Amino acid sequence: MIFENFTESDLQHLKPLEPEGWGDLMPRFRLLLDNTGCFPFKLIVNKTIAAVGATILFPESAWLACIITHPDYQRQGIGEKMTRYLIDSVDMTLRPTINLIATPMGYPLYKKIGFITDSIYDHFDAVPVYRPELSDHPVRNYEPKDIEEILRLDKALSGEDRSTMLLNYMTEASVFYEGDVLTGYYLPSLGEGLIFALNAKAGTALMNLRTSTKKNAVIPQSNKEALKIMEASGLQPFRISTRMYIGKKIDWDPTAMYNRIGGQLG
């Protein structure tokens, strides 16, 4: 049993590990390999990749991501070994918070290890039909002058300094201003398409834009305004996932998240 860094050549071996409903793992691990601060690992047993997982490091916090066990090695403690290895790789004197997103299957393990529930997300396998007339305020494409404001708003709402990663996804961003104040932004190419907004006006406009290209949605249960939009369209969640943490709880605002990034970053 050996822990090693996950490398480019390992991408071709991910298919057997894909959990049902997760889809293609390659884009997730491509993101991890391509971004500074992301450290994917593999656990080798009998010359087979028995498990994978990753740590994502920000200046004062960390995330665990893509913790997956090969079907042939499930229920043998492999997932726990990988999780504890990832935790041990984080210096919690520098990064006092470790977060992750737990599926219903993974939740009991993470709870056993000591993770605490932060928020619960509803998953939808459809989104409302795109209706341009719902946007009563113009959403525009990102301009370089918006960078500072997007990073400022993201830090205020996420409670984390994620600037090193977000800068890689700015070129396709959309922004929502009210007067001179940025009140929402959408990063379509970051995971499932992150939307953060200060109010329902901005959030609704950006959700509406997102539906033109995205066919699913994941929204914190705390965001009642976003869930009203889904309910008004007759859409009901088909499952949940749980944001969890160990260490110091991050002061973030789930009511401002109108769509998450993904299982790797909340």
Image: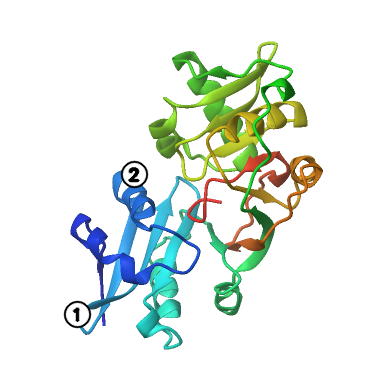
- Colour pattern: rainbow
Q: Closest to the observer: 149 or 19?
A: 19
Residue 249, percent from left and from top: 64, 56
Instruction: Give the labeled residue for mark 1.
Output: 47
Which three-letter amino acid code belongs to the residue tagged 2? Answer: Asn
Residue 245, percent from left and from top: 59, 62
Q: Closest to the observer: 112 or 24?
A: 24
| Label 2 SS | loop
Marks 2,1: beta carbons within 8 A: no
Instruction: From this view, report whether residue 171 is shown above or below residue 119.
Output: above
Instruction: From this view, report whether residue 231 is shown above or below residue 180.
Output: below
What's the CA distance linking mark 2 and mark 1?
27 Å
Left or right? Give the position of 104 relative to 168.
right
Q: How many marks?
A: 2
Left or right? Give the position of 82 relative to 97.
left
Instruction: Give the labeled residue for mark 2.
Output: 35
| Residue occupying the point 65% across, 15% down | 138
